Amino acid sequence: MSTNSPANRGNEPEPIGRFLCASGLCKKYARGSLWQKDRSITAVRDVDFEIQHGKTLALVGASGSGKSTVARCVARLERPDSGQILIGGTDIAQLHPSELAPFRSRIQMVFQDPVTSMNPRFSAREVIEEPLIISEPTIIGRQSGQVGYTREDRRDLVRTLMAEVGLSPDWMDRSILHFSGGQRQRLALARALVLRPQLLVLDEAFSGLDLSTQAQIANLLLDLQEAHQLTYLLISHDLALVVHLADVIAVMSGGRIVEIGPTQQIILNPSEAATKKQLVSAKLATAKFAAAVGAQG
Amino acid sequence: MVDNSNKYLLQVHELKVTYFPANGDPVRALDGVSLDICSGEVVGILGESGCGKSTLASALLKMLPPQAKCEDGSILFRGRDLLSLPERDLRAIRGQEISLIPQDPALALNPVMTAGSQVSEVLRSHLPLNTQQRRQGVLDLLREVGFNEPQEIYSTYPHQLSGGQRQRIAIAQAVACRPALLIADEATSELDVSLQAEIVTLLSQIRRQHGTAILAISHDPVFFAGFADRMAVMYAGRIVEVASTDVIFGRPLHPYTQALVRIATSSVVTGAAKSARLPVIDGETPNPTSLPVGCRFEPRCCERMDVCSRRYPPEFMPAPLANVNCFKYGEHVD
């Protein structure tokens, strides 16, 4: 494959150091009826964190603690009310949607439900190549000076990606209705990777899946991270899975990050009450199981 | 079988259910499933999506969708075959003798009725109580499922409640008439870990106080620990192993069960370092329209033998009260 081929384009030399720095993020949602717009709830308040290149930051916390809102702000699906999100010196928090285009391809999101996050009338190929077709006239065409992807280029790229996420490239023209939940989550990953992003935001990307499928997807994420030096922002309520994937864990409670630190430190020496509570409930939930397996195994 | 009708509350024998989709091939969702449940016993069904566990739950209440058909087998509840009962008799059984805790209470509850009146509705349709008695009954039930201020909860609407609270309302509905059998179909999979533990505690408590038998269905082995007495493991429409929960977790027999327990064990929170790969089962569950002739787990099994792909393994009993369909435990000369 030549260096100009689509699959290689956008692969920059391996960067090191800080990829993203968020500071003072706040987000309120309006609540109440049309006539009571002033009532609002604060979903996220004064959240600060950094993500290093090629590392994984996991946000954990009980439901309603603001994890998803932070994720949606980073992917700029929501506009934060205040605060900064710095990526390579640019603050994307308040950028106008028209100026966001170059960042959209660097940050991609994978959603919880692979069934409802895809157009049911698409084939696997259409799902994966759609981001290429949408973004092409705006960024890739302009920046690289190339005319763009031909139909054949796109097919090649889809083939490479499907193989990479563990799906047979022969299935590319099948309707996505023929794919199982785990296979669709693989498709969702392929779609997120097609623009060669640097950051993947994974919002509960496992929780709808079976146990064995969860393990397969978790391993796939680790493989992809090694192969492409991807940076992950991982949202999950499953502490056990997070331990396997994250370098840094941030514990959220009531819209704030109450504790942030390396995974080992958080798991072995939690200092905040909210973290301890999370750990205790996760351990309690599996304690009887661990005892049953350990008793005879 | 008649002799055992006192001992067993429910006996499912060789149940076969097939879906006939409008376009496409018929799908055999349950292929000869047999299972017994005694009074007051908690039986867990462990299986991954598409293995037929929810079809089994709806077949027991004869609430299968219109395109599904019970083709063969019997479901004896206290000696009566539910499959041949007329709809009128079934309605008396549903909710009163067998009841279901739905997977998603947000969908199962009526959004325009208060929580209390929805529980009250169950009492009204089965028991001859006056308004006063019903209200008192509902308040008692709400207290029993863990609400400290039942008066307040009575008049709230489902959207004002949290996920865990809604699940408690659904449980109050299910236990309102003191059924003999409770079916919990993935009753906690939508909730976060600490709430899951609370709901399991509540179900155990209901079982202890009222001797209710529970058929609990989940894809997560951890859910059953300390809760189920016996477990049945399902794979692609068949039960592959039935044994006590201790055996399933401590000395699982079927290679599929062994793999599931291994995966679940690695998901217990430990200080494990990042980048250690999780154990997995290679491959995917078979396509239900073209199932293998032999053992259905054979294509993914790491201990497969020649015989496994030729015919379906019969039931072996390598340990007392542990049944497994795997050639590892018996004859495999053809």
Image (tube, grey):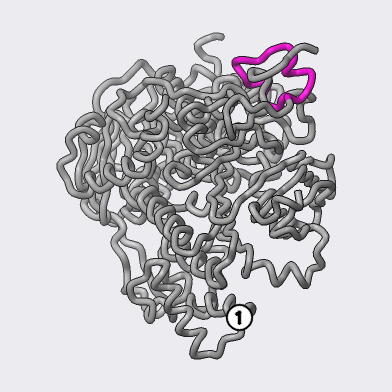
In front: A198, or B11? B11
Residue B309 in the magenta stretch? The answer is: yes
Closer to the camera, B125 or B205?
B205
**For the residue marked with disc 1, what is the amino acid?**
Leu
Query: In this picture, is A1 found above or below A127?
Result: above
* Chain at numbered mark 1: B
In this rendering, would A2 be left or right of B32?
left
User: From this viewpoint, is residue B309 visible?
Assistant: yes
Determine which residue is flagged by label 1: B127
Q: Quadrant of residue B314?
A: top right
Residue at image position (58%, 31%) is B320
Dot 1 falls on a residue whose secondary structure is loop
Q: Is residue B230 left or right of residue B325?
A: left
At 49% across and 69% down in the image, what residue appears? B172
Q: Is residue A39 above or below residue A44?
A: below
Q: In the image, is B29 to the left or to the right of A80?
A: right
Depth check: give the residue in front, A263 or A132: A263
Picture coordinates of residue A264, whole percent (x, y): 23, 29
Q: x and y percent of residue A4 in the render?
A: 52, 14
Residue A96 appears in view: no
The residue at 62%/20% (across/down) is B301
Nearer to me, B79 or B170: B79
Query: Which residue lies at the image location 38% right of the left edge and 81% below the top edge?
Result: B151
Magenta highlight range: B295-313
Where is residue A185 shown, x and y percent of the image? Answer: 55, 35
Q: Quadrant of the C terminus of chain B?
A: top right
Above or below for A74 versus B66: above
Residue farthest to the front? B3
Task: Please give left or right for residue A40 compared with residue A97 in the image.
Answer: left
